[in-house]
Amino acid sequence: MSENTEKSALHESNSSPDSKNFSATSAEKIKNFRKQNLSVEELLKDLLKGNKTALGKAITMIESNQIKHQQISQKIIEGALPYTKKSIRIGITGVPGVGKSTFIESFGTYLTKMGRKVAVLAVDPSSSLTRGSILGDKTRMEDLVKDKNAFIRPSPSGDSLGGVAKKTRESILLCEAAGFEVILIETVGVGQSETTVHSMTDFFLLLKLAGAGDELQGIKRGIIEMADAIVINKADGDNMKAAQHAKLEFKRALHLYPIKENNWKPKVSLCSALYDIGIAEIWELISEFETQTKENGHFEKKRIEQNKFWLYQTINDHLKSRFYQNKKIKPALEKQLKLIEENKTTAYAAAKYLLELD
């Protein structure tokens, strides 16, 4: 309800023959309008103070598909925007079983002990059949979840590709506004399609296992080319020799790639997240990257390029949503699907027909 609408409601009620007979409907609308604006302001105020409950509520709001929630979330994001850009965003990826959650638990705890505020945005894979997600990352980060300087938010990937949730980008901005200095984005770990996280982070860390048979196969993978660091996890005990061998193989593989535009040479490191070995060295490596790229101007340049990318991404998402919400599309789509089943049309012809309807 706009300010004009509120005035109109008041005028309507006061112009009634009986001034005491105030319009209950108009009064309720005005009350709800004021209450909604107040709640958004209070939520944003608490979020900017670093209140984790407010941050969780704000992220829930931006993840909602309800139109009224989307309108509120837009106000929250606009209010939070001036307080962003004060963090290092780290994307962490790797195949399932590589130990991402254990690594984040160890790495995050190390940072909070240094006085850093750490936010973890963990993306959980959604079932292609039930559309549900377990969202159990908090159970694997028992110490970090209780840390006052840490915030952990699991989100379902839904139908989003690229290893991240649809609103991960906005969640990052809210975490920064809440004062979190290090944002860790844990991806679903599905392999080569996990590239979208690279377009919303400053540093891209790839976790690997020794002896998994993919050391040289890594040469073929585009995800290796995007990595700013490769960390061989579970480098302890009897696995140490294999980990050192894997480190050597990946270092050789990285020499085959051209030098990055930011002049950063990707590093290969060993760690054991379970025993907190090599964690400090990884943070030193990330700090070195941050210093170097800020000095040569590429840190800010990448942030600007990311914003441009997300402009196009937002437009694409909006066009897709508008297409499927078109009342003419749903019956026409069902008809075209039936024709495809009967082999009376092609997918290309059906798509062309539907797009022309929009």
Image (tube, rainbow, N blue to C red):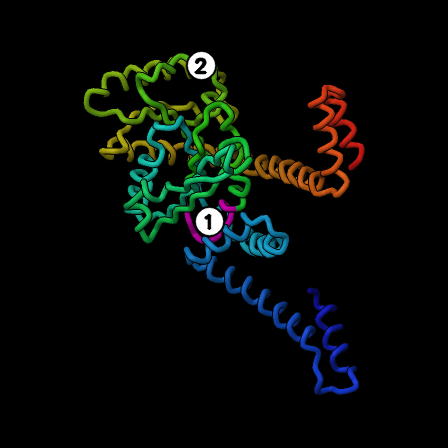
Image coords of residue 105 (percent x, y): 31, 40
Residue assigned mark 2? 219
Q: Nearer the viewer, residue 299 or 30?
A: 30
Horizontally, residue 284 falls left or right of residue 298, namely left
User: In the rendered view, would you say 4 is above or below 326?
Assistant: below
In the foreground, 289 or 219: 219
Query: How crowded is the residue under tag 1: few (<14 C-alpha within 10 Å), some, or many (20+)?
Result: many
Range of residues picked out in magenta = 171-181
Name the residue beneath numbered marker 1.
Answer: 175
Q: Please tell me whether residue 137 belongs to the stretch shown in magenta.
A: no
Residues at marks 1 and 2 touching, judged by CB atoms closer than 8 Å:
no
Specify the quadrant of the image occupied by residue 336. top right
Label 1's element? Answer: helix
Secondary structure at badge 2 equals helix
- Can residue 352 be seen at all in this image of the molecule? yes
Q: Residues within 10 Å of mark 2 (few under 14, many from 20)?
A: some
The mark total stands at 2
Q: Is residue 198 visible?
A: no
Q: Is residue 307 left or right of residue 134?
A: right
Q: Amino acid at mark 1?
A: Cys
Residue for point 51% across, 28% down:
195
Determine the residue positioned at 73% across, 20% down.
346
